Image (tube, rainbow, N blue to C red):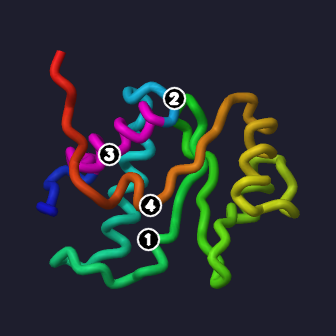
Amino acid sequence: MGIMSDVDAVHPYFAAKAAEWMSRAGGDPADSGDLARWAQIVWHAAHDELGACIYNSFIYRGVIIAQDGTLLAETFRSEEGADYVYRADLRRLGCGASANVVGLARGAIHQAVGQPVAYCRYSEVCEGPTPQRSLP
Protein backbone atom coordinates (compact mmCIF):
# COMPACT_ATOMS: atom_id res chain seq x y z
CA MET A 1 0.00 0.00 0.00
CA GLY A 2 1.50 3.35 -1.00
CA ILE A 3 2.21 6.12 1.48
CA MET A 4 -0.31 8.97 1.41
CA SER A 5 1.05 12.53 1.64
CA ASP A 6 -2.07 14.03 3.26
CA VAL A 7 -2.48 12.93 6.87
CA ASP A 8 -6.28 13.17 6.63
CA ALA A 9 -6.52 11.33 3.31
CA VAL A 10 -8.00 7.86 3.22
CA HIS A 11 -6.50 5.41 0.75
CA PRO A 12 -9.02 4.53 -2.01
CA TYR A 13 -8.82 0.85 -1.01
CA PHE A 14 -10.19 1.52 2.49
CA ALA A 15 -12.77 3.99 1.15
CA ALA A 16 -14.06 1.40 -1.35
CA LYS A 17 -14.10 -1.45 1.20
CA ALA A 18 -15.96 0.69 3.77
CA ALA A 19 -18.51 1.95 1.22
CA GLU A 20 -19.19 -1.61 0.06
CA TRP A 21 -19.57 -2.81 3.66
CA MET A 22 -22.00 0.03 4.51
CA SER A 23 -24.09 -0.81 1.46
CA ARG A 24 -24.23 -4.52 2.37
CA ALA A 25 -25.14 -3.61 5.98
CA GLY A 26 -28.10 -1.50 4.83
CA GLY A 27 -26.50 1.90 5.32
CA ASP A 28 -25.63 4.67 2.92
CA PRO A 29 -22.17 4.24 1.38
CA ALA A 30 -21.77 8.03 1.61
CA ASP A 31 -21.73 7.62 5.41
CA SER A 32 -18.73 5.27 5.40
CA GLY A 33 -15.97 7.85 6.00
CA ASP A 34 -15.43 7.09 9.70
CA LEU A 35 -15.30 3.36 8.98
CA ALA A 36 -12.76 3.90 6.18
CA ARG A 37 -10.55 6.00 8.48
CA TRP A 38 -10.78 3.35 11.24
CA ALA A 39 -9.85 0.61 8.75
CA GLN A 40 -6.83 2.54 7.51
CA ILE A 41 -5.61 3.33 11.03
CA VAL A 42 -5.95 -0.22 12.33
CA TRP A 43 -4.38 -1.71 9.17
CA HIS A 44 -1.33 0.55 9.56
CA ALA A 45 -1.13 -0.25 13.28
CA ALA A 46 -0.95 -3.95 12.43
CA HIS A 47 1.67 -3.69 9.66
CA ASP A 48 5.24 -2.47 9.32
CA GLU A 49 6.35 0.03 6.67
CA LEU A 50 6.80 -2.78 4.13
CA GLY A 51 3.25 -4.05 4.61
CA ALA A 52 4.13 -7.16 6.64
CA CYS A 53 1.68 -7.99 9.42
CA ILE A 54 3.51 -7.58 12.73
CA TYR A 55 0.63 -7.47 15.24
CA ASN A 56 -1.81 -10.31 14.67
CA SER A 57 -4.06 -9.15 17.52
CA PHE A 58 -5.27 -6.25 15.35
CA ILE A 59 -6.77 -8.59 12.76
CA TYR A 60 -9.27 -9.72 15.40
CA ARG A 61 -10.58 -6.20 16.03
CA GLY A 62 -13.83 -4.73 14.87
CA VAL A 63 -16.28 -1.91 15.42
CA ILE A 64 -19.94 -1.49 16.19
CA ILE A 65 -21.27 1.11 13.77
CA ALA A 66 -24.59 2.94 13.63
CA GLN A 67 -26.70 3.08 10.49
CA ASP A 68 -25.71 6.75 10.07
CA GLY A 69 -22.01 5.77 9.96
CA THR A 70 -21.08 6.75 13.52
CA LEU A 71 -18.47 4.44 15.04
CA LEU A 72 -19.84 3.56 18.47
CA ALA A 73 -17.57 0.95 20.03
CA GLU A 74 -14.52 -1.19 19.33
CA THR A 75 -14.35 -4.94 19.70
CA PHE A 76 -11.68 -7.52 20.40
CA ARG A 77 -11.40 -11.31 20.36
CA SER A 78 -10.68 -13.23 23.57
CA GLU A 79 -8.21 -16.10 23.81
CA GLU A 80 -11.23 -18.42 23.77
CA GLY A 81 -12.29 -17.03 20.38
CA ALA A 82 -15.34 -14.97 21.40
CA ASP A 83 -15.75 -11.37 20.27
CA TYR A 84 -16.38 -8.70 22.91
CA VAL A 85 -17.13 -4.98 23.04
CA TYR A 86 -14.78 -2.97 25.23
CA ARG A 87 -16.54 -2.31 28.55
CA ALA A 88 -15.43 1.35 28.57
CA ASP A 89 -17.30 1.89 25.28
CA LEU A 90 -20.45 0.31 26.72
CA ARG A 91 -20.26 2.51 29.81
CA ARG A 92 -19.69 5.61 27.66
CA LEU A 93 -22.85 4.76 25.69
CA GLY A 94 -24.85 4.25 28.90
CA CYS A 95 -25.33 0.53 28.35
CA GLY A 96 -23.73 -0.82 31.50
CA ALA A 97 -20.81 -3.14 31.03
CA SER A 98 -21.95 -6.57 32.14
CA ALA A 99 -23.08 -8.07 28.82
CA ASN A 100 -20.17 -7.28 26.54
CA VAL A 101 -20.28 -10.27 24.18
CA VAL A 102 -20.86 -8.68 20.76
CA GLY A 103 -24.29 -10.23 20.15
CA LEU A 104 -25.72 -9.07 23.47
CA ALA A 105 -23.92 -5.74 23.40
CA ARG A 106 -25.30 -4.90 19.95
CA GLY A 107 -28.83 -5.05 21.32
CA ALA A 108 -27.97 -2.80 24.24
CA ILE A 109 -26.15 -0.34 21.97
CA HIS A 110 -29.10 -0.29 19.55
CA GLN A 111 -31.41 0.65 22.42
CA ALA A 112 -28.99 3.29 23.70
CA VAL A 113 -28.51 5.08 20.38
CA GLY A 114 -31.99 4.58 18.94
CA GLN A 115 -30.92 3.39 15.51
CA PRO A 116 -29.87 0.11 13.92
CA VAL A 117 -26.27 -0.94 14.52
CA ALA A 118 -24.03 -3.51 12.86
CA TYR A 119 -20.78 -5.28 13.61
CA CYS A 120 -17.89 -4.80 11.17
CA ARG A 121 -14.81 -7.01 11.49
CA TYR A 122 -11.28 -6.00 10.49
CA SER A 123 -11.29 -8.67 7.79
CA GLU A 124 -14.32 -7.11 6.10
CA VAL A 125 -12.69 -3.73 5.47
CA CYS A 126 -8.94 -4.41 5.69
CA GLU A 127 -8.44 -7.61 3.69
CA GLY A 128 -9.32 -8.97 0.28
CA PRO A 129 -9.63 -7.46 -3.16
CA THR A 130 -10.77 -3.93 -3.84
CA PRO A 131 -14.50 -3.92 -4.62
CA GLN A 132 -15.38 -3.32 -8.25
CA ARG A 133 -17.72 -0.43 -8.90
CA SER A 134 -20.82 -1.35 -10.82
CA LEU A 135 -21.31 0.53 -14.07
CA PRO A 136 -24.44 2.68 -14.49
Tag 3, which secondary structure?
A: helix
Q: Is residue 49 left or right of residue 60?
A: left
Give the mark nearer the N terminus: 4 vs 2: 2
* Residue 54, placed above or below residue 121: below
Q: Which residue is mark 3?
A: 17
Question: Where, quadrant-wise, is the N terminus in this rendering?
Answer: bottom left
Give the mark nearer the N terminus: 3 vs 4: 3
Identify the residue shown where x is 79% and y is 38%. Answer: 112
* Residue 49, placed above or below residue 43: below
* Residue 80, placed above or below residue 15: below
Magenta-colored stretch includes residue 22: yes
- Judging depth in this view, the residue of 26 and 50 nearest the camera is 26
Callout 2: 10 Å neighbours few (<14), some, many (20+)?
Answer: few
Give the mark nearer the N terminus: 1 vs 2: 2
Q: Is residue 129 left or right of residue 95?
A: left
Identify the residue shown where x is 12% and y is 61%. Answer: 2
The numbered mark at residue 59 is 1
Q: Which amino acid lies under the numbered mark 3 shown in the image of this protein?
A: Lys
Please give the range of residues in magenta.
8-24
Tag 2, which secondary structure?
A: loop
Q: Position of residue 67 (x, y in %)?
A: 57, 31
Q: Position of residue 49 (x, y in %)?
A: 19, 77
